[in-house]
Amino acid sequence: MNKILLISCLCFFHSSLFAQKKNEGFVLQMKKASSPISVDGKPDDNAWKETDEAANFFMITPMDTSKATVSTSVRMCYDDKNIYLLAICYKKLTGPYMVESLRRDFIFGKNDNFLVFIDPFDDQTNGFSFGSNAAGAQWDGTMFDGGKVDLNWDNKWTSVVTNTAEAWIFEAAIPFKTIRYKKGITQWGINFSRLDIRVAEKSSWAPVPRQFPSASLAYSGILKWDAEPPQAGSNISIIPYVLGGVQKDYDNDAPANIKKQAGFDAKIGVTSSLNLDLTVNPDFSQVEVDRQVTNLDRFELFFPERRQFFLENGDQFSNFGYNNIRPFFSRRIGLNAPIIAGARISGKINKDWRLGAMDMVTGKVDSVELPAQNYTVLALQRRVFARSNIGLIFINKQAFDYDNGNDTAKYTYAPYNRNLGLEYNLASMNNLWTGKAILVKSFSPDKTGNDWVHAANLQFSNKKWTAGWQHEYVGKNYTAEVGYVPRNNYFKINPAVNRLFFPGSGPILSHGIRLSSTYFFDAKLTEQTDNETFLAYTMSFRNQTVFTSWVAHDYVKLLQPFDPTNSGKDTLARGTEHSWNAWGTEFVSKPQSVFTFGFSTRYGGYYEDGTRLNITTELGYRIQPFVSIALSTSYNDIRMPAPWNRTTLWLIGPRIDITFTNTLFFTAFLQYNEQQKNVNLNTRFQWRYRPASDLFIVYTDNYYTDPLLVRNRALVIKFNYWWNL
C-alpha cells in the first residue's frame, strides 16, 4: 500500500512539473507592419488593419468562471526597430475613468489600467511588463519568479493614451534595444491584463485563476512571430550626469558644503539577451527617501533597494534566500562609503541559463578608519523541469590594503567575508505548487564552525485552500556582511493554512480563515525562544472593500537585553520570559472613490505584563488626474510598570504628488517621527524632458521635534541624459 501511495505521489509531481503549457492554445500572430505607425493614441494607421486581434478577455476577479463584461481589443506588430502595441479599452459605464494621478509606475489596484506581460524566452519565469493607466501614466518593470514585477526598472519607450466617450486607447512603441531576448526564438510568452475599477473587474486575454496575479507567466499565451525578431543591432547607451548642490550641517555648526559632481552609467548589449552595466562615481541623490516606521522590533528592520544601478535583473542576486535570510543585500554597498565604480553583467545565456556577475569598489573613509572595499557577486541559474530552477551564488567582500599586523584583536573591520550558497526553486506548471530550498555557508577570518544556513518551504494554492510549511536554520557563527540576516543561532518552523468560501450572491465575494504558527528554538533544538500563533478571518466584498479581524498569542524569551519602547528607557534582562494575547482589525476601502481610507488596530498585552494599543490610518484623496494627497499615521500607546510607565509614539506622514503632465512631477513628503525625535521634509521636482532623461531638483530638511530646530539641510540639482550610440 505504501509503495502504491509513493508511486502515485511521484506520478502526480511528475505531471505537475512536466505538463504542457496551460494556455498554449491562445496564440496571437505577430506580423511585420505593412506601413509606418505613428504613436499618437489613434487606431487609424493602415498597418493596424492587417494585424491579428486579441479579444474576448476572461474575467479573473471578482470570479474567474466567465468572460469579462468589459471589452478589450489588443493588436501587435513590429518593424526593424520597435514592437508596437495598440489596446482599445472599451467602457461599460459612462463617466470618467478612475486613476490616482499621472505618476509613473502607479499602484495597480488604484488605477484603471492596461498591462502587457512579455516572456521573450517563453520560460514562464522572467520577462518584462509595460502598460499605462487610463490617463497615460506609464508602467514598466522586469518580471521574475514567474509573476512578480519590479517597477524600479526604468528604460526607454514611448506611449500615448487618448480618451473617447466609448473607450480609452493605449498605443506604444517598445524598442528592441529596451528588452532582452535571444536571437532565433520565434515563440514568446505573452498575456494582457485589464483592470476596470468602476465595475470592479480584472480580466486577461489568456485566462488566469483568481488566486494568482494577472502577471502569472504560467498562464501566458503565445506570441508567434512570422519571422525571427530583428536583432537590436549596436546597443550601447551612455547616461552621463552632472549635479551641483549645497549642504549645511547645523548639528555640528559646520560651514556650508558646496557639492559638485559628475559621473556616468553605461549599458552595453553584449548579446540581445545579456547586458553589461557600468557605473563611475554614481550618485543617488534623486532616490526617494525611505518611508519611516515606528520600530518596536528586537532586530534590524528591512528597507528595500531603490538605486537604479542595482535593479535590472536584480532578482537574480537579491531574491536568493528568504525575506529574513538574504545572503546578498545591495544596500550594504555604499552604505557608509562612496562608490567609486562598478560593473555588472546580467541576463539570459539561453532559454535554460541565467548569469549575473557584479563587481563594485568603494572608497575608504579615514574618519572611521574604514578601508576601501571590493564587493564581488556571482549568480548562476539553471532551469530544470518546466518552470523550476537551481541557483548558485557567491559573495565576496574584501578590504584593500588592510593589515592588522597578524593580530586578530586589532581588527576594527573583518578583512573579508564570503558566502557560498545553493538554491532550488520549485514552481509547478500550473503554479499550484511552489517552494524553495537553500543551503548557504559563510567564510570569515575569526568565525568557524556553525556557520551554515539551511531553509526550505513548500506551498500549495488553489481557489479554496492555501497550505504551506517553512523551516529555517541559521548557525551561531553564520555571518553575511553583505546580506540581511537580522538574527542567527536559531531553528524556526512555520506551518500555515488558509481556507476561502465563495457565496453565490450577496455583497460578500469571499470570506475565509487563516491559521499560522511560528516557533523559534535555539540552533540545537533544546529550548524554545519565541512563538506566535495567529488566527485571522477576512471578508472581501464585491466592491473591493476588505475587512480582516484577528487574534494572536505571543511568547518571547529574550536573548539580549531589550528596551520594549526603543526610546532610550531601561532594558529588560536577558533570559526573561514574556507572553501575551492580542487582537486587531484591518480595513481597506473600495478604490472606486476619489477619497480612500484604510486602518488597522491592535490591542492587547505586551512585555512585562504591559499593554499596547496601536492604531494606523491611511487616507487618500485624488483630484484626477493631476493631484494625489495621502496621509499616513501610526499611534502607539504602551503602558508598562516603572521605569517605562506610559510611552506614546506618533508617526505622521503627509504626502502630496502633483503630476502636471506624464513627464512633469512634483512630490513633497513630510515625516514626523516621535520615536526618533525627528521631522524630515523631502521635496522632489522631476522633468522627464526626453525618454529616460531627467532634470531633478531635490530639497531635504531635518529638524529636531522639541524644540523645532533645524539639524541639516540640502539642495541638489541633477541633470542626466540617456544617449544611444
Image (tube, rainbow, N blue to C red):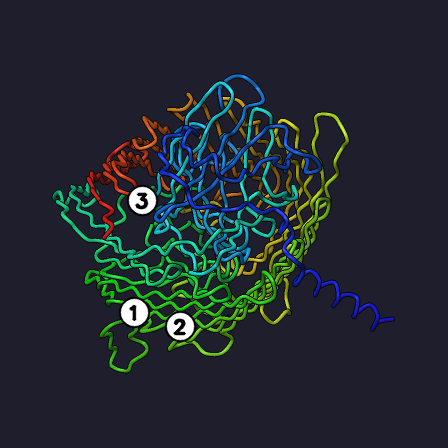
Q: Residue 287 — which label? A: 3
Is residue 484 toward the left or the right of residue 696 in the image? right
Residue 471 falls in image quadrant: bottom right
- Most extreme residue toward the right is 1
Q: Residue at x 33, y 35 (%)?
A: 679
Classed neighbour count for the residue bearing mark 3: other residues with Cα under 10 Å, few (<14), some (14–19), many (≥20)? few
Q: Type of residue at label 2?
A: Arg
Measure the C-alpha gap from mark 2 to mark 3.
Answer: 29 Å
Q: Position of residue 263 (x, y in %)?
A: 19, 53
Disc on the earlier residue, 1 or 2: 1
Residue at numbered disc 2 = 418
From the viewer's perspective, tell me whether residue 293 is left or right of residue 696: right
The three-letter amino acid code for the residue at tag 1 is Thr
Residue 616 image point, x, y percent: 51, 33
Other residues around mark 1 within 10 Å, as few (<14) / some (14–19) / many (≥20): few
Q: Earlier in the sequence, mark 3 or mark 1?
A: 3
Q: Does the residue at mark 2 contact the one at mark 3 (Cβ under 8 Å)?
A: no
Question: Could you tell me residue 250's position as x and y percent?
Answer: 19, 41
Against 693, is 413 above or below?
below
530 left or right, relative to 272: right
Q: Is residue 654 visible?
A: no
Mark 2 vs mark 3, foreground winner is: 3
Question: What secondary structure is found at the residue carrying circle 3?
Answer: loop
Secondary structure under badge 1? loop
The percent coordinates of residue 214 (x first, y second) are 57, 43
Q: Residues within 10 Å of mark 2 (few under 14, many from 20)?
A: many
Q: Secondary structure at mark 2?
A: strand
Above or below for 702 versus 387: above
Query: Which image quarter holds the N terminus?
Result: bottom right
Quickly name the residue at label 1.
Answer: 412
Cα separation, mark 3 vs mark 1, equals 31 Å
Q: Nearer the viewer, residue 56 or 441?
A: 56
